[in-house]
Amino acid sequence: MSGGTLAVNGGIGLSLERMNSILKIDEQNMQVITQPAVITQELQNAVAEKAPLRLNPSRGTCSIGGNLAENSGRPNRQIWCYKDFVLNLACAEWPKLSILEPIHSKTVLAITSLQLMIGSEGTLGIITKAVLKLPCKT
């Protein structure tokens, strides 16, 4: 369980709280582009008419970036794991900004940097933007 930062032994604390905008809701392609500090409940409310997102239960207090960093959710039909609907991530990695996209491969064991970033808890880079697919409304 995480949620707090304690910078010891020369460490730093990084706040992304100002990166809190939903940049685009693309209804035609069923995608949403969001910054990491968007509160999960706000995202769900913004897309409720277009797609029923069923994200983690603490959605009113957690952010999209934090959920991606932790890969929160449950692998069942009621609540989705974040890794299941991430299309792209923009990440600040030392020393540059990277855009991570999935690699479409016939090899089942292919692991991409996108898959590694989700759940890495900030150790591989800082998520600065996410493109998420929206489920079709049923």
Image (cartoon, rainbow, N blue to C red):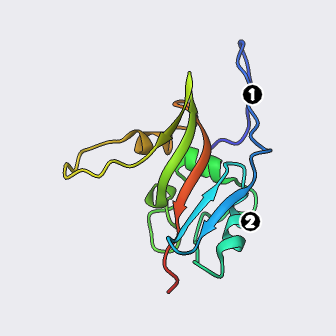
Residue 72: % across, % down: 55, 54
Residue 48: % across, % down: 66, 78
Please give left or right for residue 109 compared with residue 43 in the image: left
Which residue is rendered at x = 72% and y = 49% of the image?
A: 37
Please give left or right for residue 113 compared with residue 63 in the image: left
In the figure, 6 relative to 20: above or below?
Answer: above
Which residue is rendered at x = 49% and y = 70% of the image?
A: 29
- Name the residue carrying label 1: 13
Q: Secondary structure at mark 2?
A: helix
The N terminus is located in which quarter? top right
Q: Secondary structure at mark 1?
A: loop
Which residue is rendered at x = 44% and y = 63% of the image?
A: 75
Using the image, tell me which numbered label, if any, was put on residue 91: none
Please name which of the two marks, 2 or 1, marks the residue nearer to the observer: 2
Please give left or right for residue 41 compared with residue 29 in the image: right
Front-most of 54 and 86?
Answer: 86
Residue 51: % across, % down: 57, 77
Q: As drawn, which residue projects farthest toward the right?
A: 18
Q: As drawn, which residue projects farthest toward the bottom?
A: 138
> Going from the N terminus, do you reach mark 2 or mark 1 first?
1
Where on the picture, by quarter, is residue 22? bottom right
Q: Real-space Cα distance between discs 2 and 1?
A: 25 Å
- Name the residue carrying label 2: 42
Where on the picture, by quarter, is residue 92? top right
In the figure, 49 relative to 114: above or below?
Answer: below
Q: What type is the residue that disc 1 sits on? A: Gly
Q: As drawn, which residue projects farthest toward the front?
A: 28
